[in-house]
Amino acid sequence: MNLLPDSLLELIRRASVEMPDDVHRAIVASLEREKQGTIARSAMKIIDQNIALARTKSQPICQDTGTIIFYVECPAGFDQIGFEEAARGAVKLATAKGFLRQNSVDSITGRNDGTNVGPGSPVIHFHQHRPLETTVRVILKGGGCENVGAQYSLPHEGLKANRDLDGCRKAILDAVLQAQGKGCGPGILGVCIGGDRATGYEFSKEQFLRRLDDHNPNPELDRLEQDLVSTANKLGIGPMGFGGRTTLLGTKIGVLNRLPASYFVSVSYMCWAYRRQGIALGSQGEVRQWLY
Amino acid sequence: MALLSILRWVPFAMITLTTPVSEAAVRALKVGDEVAITGVLFTGRDAVHRYLHDGGQLPPGVNLRGGFLYHCGPVIVKDEQGNWRCVAAGPTTSIREEPYQWQIIRDYGLRGIIGKGGMGDKTLAACKEHGCVYLHAVGGAAQVLAQCIQRVPKVYFMEEFGAPEAIWEFEAAGFPAVVTMDAHGNSLHKEVFAASQAELAKLL
């Protein structure tokens, strides 16, 4: 696995500087939807130029390179400790090279040692699986969009939201309303229905590993995902909250079991600068395949 | 009149603001105006706002009078010649500075706040009283905006606050932004929130 550090560095670089194709297509479509001569269209044009410029210059799409979240799928016997060491090393190097901002701060002292490595940074989730292949996916999630995430406990009297899918819809649309443009819209929602307060948010973020153009295998949730996007786009919040036709580029919903006493709807908001990338590793830790 | 209002939206009608900006120039701006800023910008975010609010002094060399404060934590690297180079410089969320911003507008003679997401009533009132506007840059557009930062002559409070929170001095040219809160008490953010809330009530 001696090529792993290089592979992880390149994974982080691409995640930070290159927009995944599925997201870029959605952004171009939303640019074309906005009316000529509006500030919404100007904003989408700047966004589109920005995507091209970041790729050409190999510099971060957004200066807030965010929380660094790795998702590793690996066979039994995979050296997780070795992977964690390699990941921390790659994060330090990517930071020194300017692919990541010095973004990790001691919560009590406010000290920023400039490495992006510390308690809770980077985040690494391991999942063992039966196939012998190892895949590594990474999401960079900025603070602006993280701050507009919301968790609802149903029933919610103010929203008239009961413990059913209609109640979930009301909660999710409230999250969109409250977020306005503050999370750098047009955004993408990752939603978890169920779970507890921690697993709900965690699973809502995991939805961002899905492609924007995929479909939820559960037909009822698939309809809800489509409905949420079209309803949100009628609200007129628009890019950056400037007013306009595209408020959401997508919504992805996952479901976990819950306790009889709890009914959480956890909503994570991803900004338009939707940075995700993934690799399948070869036996020496080299990149065998890009996943997005 | 109708023709004028149409012209106002097209890019070549972008209003140029060069620092230092006069109060009259700022009071002439209206919500929805697209502007291009040229001149000196200072960055400042959470740590700087709290520090100034608590009575801290600006270091010599940082003059905000007639100028713009940019809510931004840039990515800056040093090139081979030892000069700072701005690699990425989009706006950060402004609402976190709402408890402090009014005072900084009042005390330091700011003519513009640049950020994203908009701000609240205290800032809106300070803009009206002291002649200041809130300028919304495109959140996440770190490369397009970094291209408008031609030089980074100085940094202040690097040791104390760390790179994203430091005060960076930028020389900008043609930096694009939209007036979303003007000096007449108008806020696009309030308008869009109210309209979208009414629309949602119809769709539930």
Image (cartoon, rainbow, N blue to C red):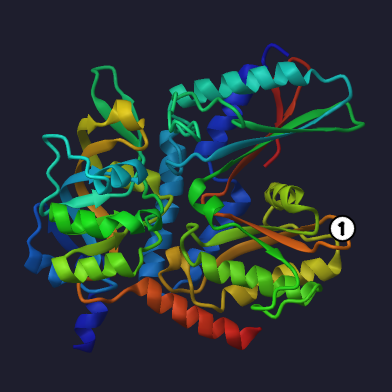
Q: Nearer the viewer, residue A107 or A8?
A: A107
- Of all residues, the one furthest to the right in this rendering is A130
Q: Is residue A193 left or right of residue B14?
A: right
- The total number of labels drawn is 1
Given the image, what chain letter belongs to the residue carrying mark 1? A
Q: Is residue A253 above or below residue B180?
A: above
Q: Quadrant of the N terminus of chain B?
A: bottom left
Residue at point 31%, 29% (across, down): B160
- Residue identified by numbered label 1: A259
Residue at point 21%, 53% (across, down): B104
- Does dot 1 land on a helix, a strand or a loop? loop
The image quadrant that residue A225 belongs to is bottom right
Residue at point 68%, 75% (across, down): A170
Q: Is residue A13 left or right of residue A60?
A: right
Q: Is residue A176 above or below residue B72?
A: below
Q: Is residue A12 left or right of residue A144?
A: right
Q: Nearer the viewer, residue A281 or B129?
A: B129
| Residue A263 in sight from this viewpoint | yes
The image quadrant that residue B4 belongs to is bottom left
Q: x, y percentage for residue A84? A: 68, 22
Q: x, y percentage for residue A120? A: 62, 32
Label 1 sits on what residue type? Leu
- Of all residues, the one furthest to the front in this rendering is B54
Residue at point 32%, 42% (across, down): B146
| Residue B110 in sight from this viewpoint | no
Q: x, y percentage for residue B44? A: 29, 44
Label 1: how many Cα within 10 Å (few below 14, some 14–19, many 20+): few
